[in-house]
Amino acid sequence: MSMVRTGVAVAAMMWAGLSQAQDVIKIGVIAPLTGPQAASGQQIVAGAKLYQALNGTKVGGKTIELVIKDDTGVADITRRLAQELIVNEKVAAITGFGLTPLALAVGPVITQAKVPAVIMVAGTSMIVGTSPYFVRISFTLPQNTAPVAQWAVENNVKTAVTLVSDYGPGLDAAGAFKKRLEAGGGKVTEELKAPLADPDFAPFLQRAKDLKPDALFLFVPAPTAGALMKQVVDRGLPQSGIKVVGTGDVTDDDQLNGMGDGVLGMITSYNYSASHDSAENRKFVAEFKKANANRRPNVIGVGGYDGIHAIYAAIAKNNGNTEGPKLIEAFKGLSWTSPRGPVSIDPETRDIVQNVYVRKVERKDGELYNMEFKTYENQKDPK
Ligand code: VNL
């Protein structure tokens, strides 16, 4: 009798364990939490955790569990972690990817395993086309560059020099700037490229100053912005008669206050500003600061937040079914109001469609902000 009862009890416990496992959906978050890109990883994780803190962990009766891993910004580690998360943890999707090479490294893994990967940061245009399982909620560099190039055309810039980090997003940004400026009658007179790792910007900035163009266009990945802009300001470029412009990566919200008054007046275009004037953003910024020792969210923080939102929305749309081929379909055509403004996922390309804003660095309430003054609505990647 007691053996029967024990058997029943064990079976009941096993059943409880099994149904509990089935009720949990694991999502792998791979981010550079240490190393030179650590600032990006911290923003990803802070944004992702904030989404769960504000919206709970339940979707369609299941519990969403984030499994967070540090790839240290090294692509081979990103790939290995993706494999381990898929094979051992049985994650329904992976997300994160703080740099273009880190996203590209997981393409073959997700294609083979048929597991969706949601890109929260990487911005090189071609990434999403390399696997039918990629979705992007961040931005593309051509998308974020075209409006500031248009601003240059409209503000009498006839000659420009471009200075970018020498890898995918930098080449995309420089190419997009040149295309727009030259379509508007201007000319890029020199295309400078600085190494991605440990760059010394001094010789490039001196070269740009000597060339005396009407404008200097800049792109570096956001965590490098502070180092670049210190050199730009120290060399007096903004005062030299050259209009210094860029994508919003170089006036990164996470570091803008540390750049000082030398960056006042700088024009950039971007998909997100911490000063974006909407109810959703005011709440997002206030809650992010509260949860992160008053740190300001940047484009990557909002990427972490929106990436988890997109995953929740896709799982909800499928009533909790997370089979890879069905889950990737559910991302197509999603639309929502992000802290950055209205966004959607293009069902054809799986890339983000969003507003891009032209902004100017101004002082507000004692702090530096990128103040939006012109909006280009519903921008796709301008292929
Ligand atoms: C990339 C593009 C990375 C823009 C960034 O910061 C950024 C990338 C980490 O595609 O590697 O601001």
Image (tube, rainbow, N blue to C red):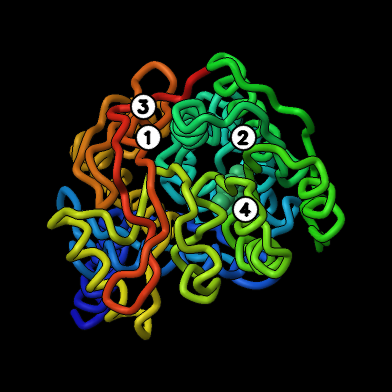
Residue at horizontal 47 percent and vertical 48 percent from the top: 267
Mark 4 residue element: loop
Relative horizontal placement of residue 160, taking residue 279 as reference (left or right)? right
Nearest-to-viewer mark from 4 and 1: 4
Q: Position of residue 367 (x, y in %)?
A: 36, 75
Q: Amino acid at mark 3?
A: Gln
C-alpha span from label 1 to label 3:
30 Å
Q: Amino acid at mark 2?
A: Ala
Number of residues whose C-alpha sits closer than 10 Å to that of mark 4, classed few (under 14), some (14–19) or many (20 or more): many
The disc, 3 or 2, on the residue closer to the chain's N-terminal end is 2
The disc, 2 or 1, on the residue closer to the chain's N-terminal end is 2
The foreground one among 199 and 366 is 366
The disc, 4 or 3, on the residue closer to the chain's N-terminal end is 4
Mark 2 residue element: helix
Residue at horizontal 46 percent and vertical 63 percent from the top: 264
The answer to whether the residues at label 3 and label 2 have Cβ atoms under 8 Å apart is no
Location of mark 4 (residue): 221
Location of mark 3 (residue): 379
Mark 1 residue element: loop
The foreground one among 254 and 187 is 187
Label drawn at residue 323 = 1
Give the vertical position of 270 relative to 185 (above or below).
Answer: below
Mark 3 residue element: strand
The disc, 2 or 4, on the residue closer to the chain's N-terminal end is 2
Q: Amino acid at mark 1?
A: Glu
C-alpha span from label 3 to label 2:
15 Å
Question: Image quadrant of residue 227?
Answer: bottom right
> Which quadrant, please, contains the N terminus?
bottom left
C-alpha span from label 4 to label 1:
34 Å
Label drawn at residue 173 = 2
The disc, 4 or 1, on the residue closer to the chain's N-terminal end is 4
Q: Which residue ends up furthest to the left in the rendered image?
A: 279
